[in-house]
Amino acid sequence: MQISSRELKIIQTSTQLTFSDIFGSWKARWGINRMNFKVEPGLYSVGNPGSSSPVLVTANYKMSFDSLRKELNELDAWILVLDTKGINVWCAAGKGTFGTKELINRIAIVQLEKVVSHKTIIIPQLGAPGISAHEVSKFSGFKVLYGPVKAKDVKEFIKAGMKASAEMRTVRFSIYDRLVLTPVDLVGTFRFSLMIFGILFLLNLLGFGPFGFVDFYAYMGAVLAGCVLTPVLLPWIPGRAFAWKGWLVGLIWAAFVNVFNGWTAVPLYSVLRALGYLLVLPSVSAYYAMNFTGSSTFTSFSGVLKEMRIAVPAIVISIFLGIVLILVNSFIKL
Amino acid sequence: MKHQYLKNVSTLKLKSDQCTGCGRCMEVCPHNVFLMEEKKSVIVDKDRCMECGACVKNCPFDALEVKQGVGCAYAIIMGWLTGTEPSCDCSDNSSGSCC
């Protein structure tokens, strides 16, 4: 009887990121080619790993893979890349694609038992929502060690004898962490914003206008207040619900727009229009701020649902009333 | 500064009689919700829980329970619109905010 054995496939990689790696990450942050920023799943090597070198598991989103390997200089290690459809570790774990089944399969596909003599694999801690450690060891024989939250702590984790400090186990969400997430949201609003500008243009043509420069920057400011300013200032804005925080920032913006345009001094700038802005702009900010819950690291499903049950109807009614007021105001002026 | 989200919303439950004090939940929780007291895990601050489900998945003794879900408004809106369970699927197109 002949026993066929598959060849081991190991891809050599480096801990140095090239310009195109870094440029690729930058593009992904702006939503360019973000859904196709992937590496091939499989087993990679950095440095000169042997049978006793550690095995680090990650996702096949290229930004995840790159942020891990760039922290491994002067280290000999294996990187096991799971097929998460190009999604990062934490999100893929939530979806289940960074999961027990894929991990067990991938260990078998790369024939990990032939590459290393030990029986441990290091999973990033944020992969835990998708991985059942005891099931992995039951079916694959490999013991799961949960590593630190951040790739930058991996080296220290290994040096400390595979022990993560409480500090390494906690998720932070610093002002920088929040800032780098804002471009994608902002780009995501463009299509919708263009639709609004299209409608305003049509209303102008039909004679309901004029909607002009003030409306344009008032709206864009409200978008920025919800998409950028609220996320950046998040912990300092009073209140807990994201929509509420966004509404507050938007309200300040709406007041600013009104005062800047001479309300209450200029009689042409009517109360109706000012009220319209006060109803529409904070609600726009609230909506976009609410959507930042998906980018945040600490909101729960139950919590978001609770805030949305109040925020969504309030936003819809407020925007509707505001638009009616602004249109009525345009009519009066005709 | 510390982030705080809504109070008294998390669906996390710990069945103390099934807990053996292995400490896995403490290890995987990204928000320090658990603490070991007298060789048993206790929930010290439920309001820090984001319902990611890591503790439930990794408890070998089924001592934990949570309704795992994504804390993402966009996912919930898409769920309402399409009549499906909210999931992190906004990644399928270029717009959208989560992940």
Image: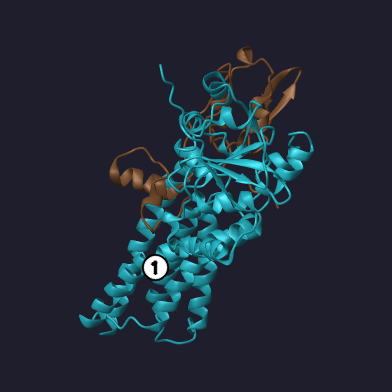
Q: Which chain is cyan?
A: A
Chain displayed in brown: B
Specify the amino acid type for callout 1. Answer: Phe
* Res B92 seen here: yes
The 10 Å Cα crowd at callout 1, few under 14, some 14 to 19, many 20 or more, is: few
Please name the residue shown 39% across and 86% down the image: A268
- Residue beneath the point at 35% across and 66% down: A191
User: Which of the 4 quarters of the picture holds residue A58?
Assistant: top right
- Place of residue A143 in the rendered image (x, y in percent of width and height, measured from the top left): 62, 25
Q: Residue at x 29, y 79 (%)?
A: A330
Q: Is residue A229 above or below residue B93?
A: below
Is label 1 in a helix, a strand or a loop?
helix
For this orientation, the residue located farthest to the front is A1
Residue drawn at the location 68% of the way across and 49% of the way down: A72
Query: In the depicted view, which residue is nearer to us: A24 or A221?
Result: A24
Q: Which residue is mark 1?
A: A190
On the image, the x and y values in percent for residue A132 come to: 54, 26
